[in-house]
Amino acid sequence: MIDDHSPALRAFHAIARYGSFTRAAAGLEVTPSALSQTMRQLEQRLGVRLLQRSTRKVGLTEAGRLFLDRITPALAEIDGAVEALRQHGDRPAGTLRITAPYSLLDQLVAPMIADFLRAYPEVTLDLIAESALTDLVADGVDAGIRLGERLARDVVAIPLGGPQRALVAGAPAYFARHGRPQHPRELQQHACARFRYSTSGAIYRWEFAHKSGAQRGRWFEIDVTGPFIVNDPVLQIHAALDGLLLVHALEPMVREHVAAGRLQTVLDAWLPPFDGFYLYYPSRLQVPPKLRVFIDFLRERLEPSA
């Protein structure tokens, strides 16, 4: 039998990750020739070719890809168990990888980064800005932050900051020129910022909830039009501040601009609160101290605004 925690499996995983014997060898701090020898021995013991080698790159065979898919979660689980055991009873330490959309990192996490790192100097915080739902185990990520409605059922989800609201906002100059919509349907006669998802390329359809009648509380979508399409919500807000268009944004992102009068909101009655943000991690993960203190740190600072 082959030990799941053996250097050979680590070697194969590193080669598959980097797509290069040279880069994998550097990451493992061994020589390329030693790494190549390790892989030849592994393939001989398995009786299956795992890698396709050429003069320029290294790829996976079909068997190699299937093998990688099976061992990656197991290696991550072993690493997590070893690290949790090593850190048991000790001060939180190590690299903590967190994934979240850029806007959430900017609004929720950025204001407290300095305080967290000062409180836990042995933790290295590795923040990854991305909108797609990440396979935490396969990508070696400790936890993610997303809206609750997007999470899978097989994760542990911890609420952060309570319910959220979206707002439709525009600059006073925009409303002076174009008027104020009284119903979401009227947005189709206005210039609106459109958000494109990076992963699918789809354009977000603005969401509203009926404010009265038999449909009260039921959500519906409006396919808005406008001269600006972008995958960064911050750029949308800048365009709204310039008086170019209307923007549909989470309330924390425009709160200061609204309070200062730089932006004004419309259609508030059609935008009730909804389930907010969650920090999530694999349900089978033994939570290491570095993640536990990060969770507690976030919840403590977000609780007053819930």
Image (cartoon, rainbow, N blue to C red):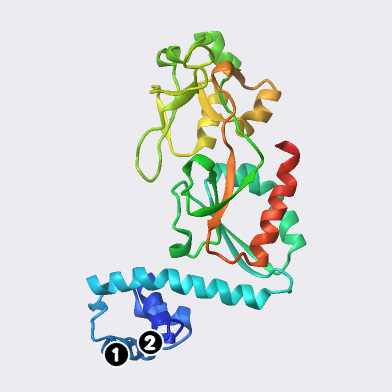
The residue labelled by disc 2 is 2
Q: Residue at x 45, y 50 (%)?
A: 133
Three-letter code, disc 2: Ile
Tell whether 101 sits left or right of 161. left
Name the element at disc 2. loop
Q: Residue at x 42, y 86 (%)?
A: 3
Three-letter code, disc 1: Arg
Up-down: is 50 above or below 107? below
Up-down: is 93 above or below 97? below
Tell me where residue 40 sits by quadrant: bottom left
Tell me where residue 171 sits by quadrant: top right
Which image quarter is the N terminus in? bottom left
The residue labelled by disc 1 is 45
Tell me where residue 250 sits by quadrant: top right
Seen from the viewer's position, the closer of residues 24 and 11 is 11
Please tell me how crowded label 2 is: few (under 14), some (14-19), or many (20+) other residues with Cα within 10 Å. few
Marks 1 and 2: in contact by CB < 8 Å? yes
Q: Residue at x 39, y 73 (%)?
A: 71
Q: Give the image location of residue 103, x and y in percent.
A: 56, 41
The number of callouts visible is 2
Please tell me how crowded label 1 is: few (under 14), some (14-19), or many (20+) other residues with Cα within 10 Å. few
Q: Give the image location of residue 287, x and y in percent.
A: 61, 64
